[in-house]
Image (cartoon, coloured by chain):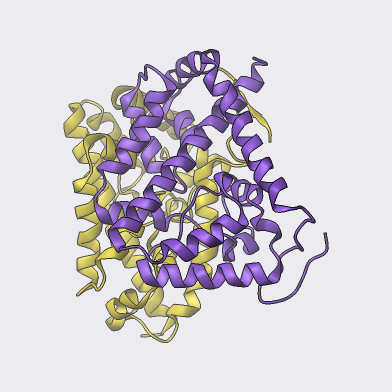
Chain colours: A purple, B yellow
């Protein structure tokens, strides 16, 4: 695809794909992600593997389950042994919930803008790059990129932290709609919204890790 | 992505490089971006400059004051305006103290081994590389390197987190002596020792940031 100059920066032109396709693709990805997770075999195998990890291995594997917050995975290693992978997921949620308001705001501030400077600079984490790509944010038109940039700036000015949404459970149009809607929330209400999105991102990133393990063992 | 023979050899690396390295790469790149921002303003006005930073700028500059824990700086941005740079330093200490035992253990687990694998691999953070260099850990004899490796392994097996010491306030002989001594501490006593060392590292890293700013304005 050819690159396009303009207010959106050097975004590639959008793929000629109707919205319904991208929605379907997102749903299919969710479905494919969830199937092995529902097969207890993956989880029962995984938790033993998880419990056998050294702290370095654990942080290497789970350190970016919460974007750029390896501290959380590093803390959760103290909770081993886990009885299930669900217990590990709950651990991430409990740690996040245990933080003060400023701590929760800090978690949101560790997230990059959607379709923002870091995407253009190529400095996103691998996980975030993949998620923004799956939501179609790596191939926005200049007009959509400009609109998203304006909304992100307005949102950050309003709340003091970036807009966070589980991009893989959304798409470009819904993300823009959510930006327009959530910017009207009250401060604490929006902090809660952002943190719940972080938990959804965590859940999918954990499923990705289990899926890689399942594939590598050809289950 | 390359496969990783780690925990059961079952995982692919979650990223092309361990997460903490990509966090740091981003941090460093953004730090370089922020230096011009500091030009022409700083030192006696440090706190004014600090208070004028956007959350992205703040995290870029202070994100590695606590090793690989940008979450803490990101949280502290909520406390602006700071009345002094000392208040910012106290904020780091207060946030660390507010964490649970597992959270404090997590902070220690975000630190690399001294003269360890990451030093050899060249994947230390810029700050940690400089600190280990100043303590003479980048030029150890084979015998000293082997001894430190053995002591680090013994320490981690004992406590479940790596040995942390403010290397710039020490040297190779004292570090080895401290490793031999502290490994005999009780768990909670040693957690406290490690966290106090983290606070010393924070204080020196903050001073480095202010000094760089002062030099850049030739004050």
Number of residue marks: 0
Residue found 29% across the figure and 83% down from its top: B45
Quadrant in the rendering for residue A190: bottom left
| A160 over A127 or under it: above or below | below
A159 left or right, relative to B83: right
Do we see residue B167 in this rendering? yes
- The location of residue B2, given as percent across then percent down, is 68, 32
Q: Farthest residue in the front direction?
A: A20
Q: Farthest residue in the right direction?
A: A2
Classify the position of the C terminus of chain A by image quarter.
Answer: top right
Quadrant in the rendering for residue B78: bottom left
| B157 over A99 or under it: above or below | above
Q: Nearer the viewer, residue B201 or B17?
A: B17
Residue found 29% across the figure and 52% down from its top: A103
A216 left or right, relative to A210: right
- The location of residue B46, given as percent across then percent down, is 31, 78
Do we see residue A113 in this rendering? no
Classify the position of the N terminus of chain A by image quarter.
Answer: bottom right
B164 left or right, relative to A12: left
Quadrant in the rendering for residue B10: top right
Residue found 69% across the figure and 62% down from its top: A140
- The location of residue B82, given as percent across then percent down, is 23, 72
- The location of residue B148, given as percent across then percent down, is 40, 32
Q: Nearer the viewer, residue B44 or A126?
A: A126
């Amino acid at each position: 695809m050819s690159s396009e100059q303009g207010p959106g920066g050097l975004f590639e032109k959008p793929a000629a794909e109707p919205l319904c396709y991208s929605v379907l693709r997102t749903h299919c990805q969710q479905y494919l992600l969830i199937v092995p997770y529902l097969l207890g075999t993956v989880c029962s195998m995984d938790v033993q593997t998880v419990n056998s990890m050294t702290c370095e291995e654990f942080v290497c594997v789970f350190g970016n389950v919460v974007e750029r917050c390896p501290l959380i995975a590093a803390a959760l290693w103290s909770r081993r042994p886990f009885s299930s992978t669900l217990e590990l997921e709950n651990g991430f949620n409990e740690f996040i919930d245990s933080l003060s308001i400023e701590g929760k705001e800090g978690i949101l501030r560790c997230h990059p803008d959607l379709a923002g400077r870091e995407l253009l600079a190529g400095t996103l984490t691998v996980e975030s790059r993949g998620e923004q790509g799956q939501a179609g944010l790596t191939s926005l038109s200049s007009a959509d990129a400009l609109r998203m940039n304006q909304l992100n700036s307005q949102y950050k000015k309003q709340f003091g932290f970036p807009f966070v949404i589980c991009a893989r459970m959304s798409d470009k149009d819904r993300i823009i709609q959510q930006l327009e809607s959530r910017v009207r929330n009250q401060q604490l209400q929006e902090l809660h919204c952002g943190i719940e999105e972080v938990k959804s991102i965590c859940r999918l990133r954990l499923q990705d890790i289990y899926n890689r393990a399942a594939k590598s063992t050809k289950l």
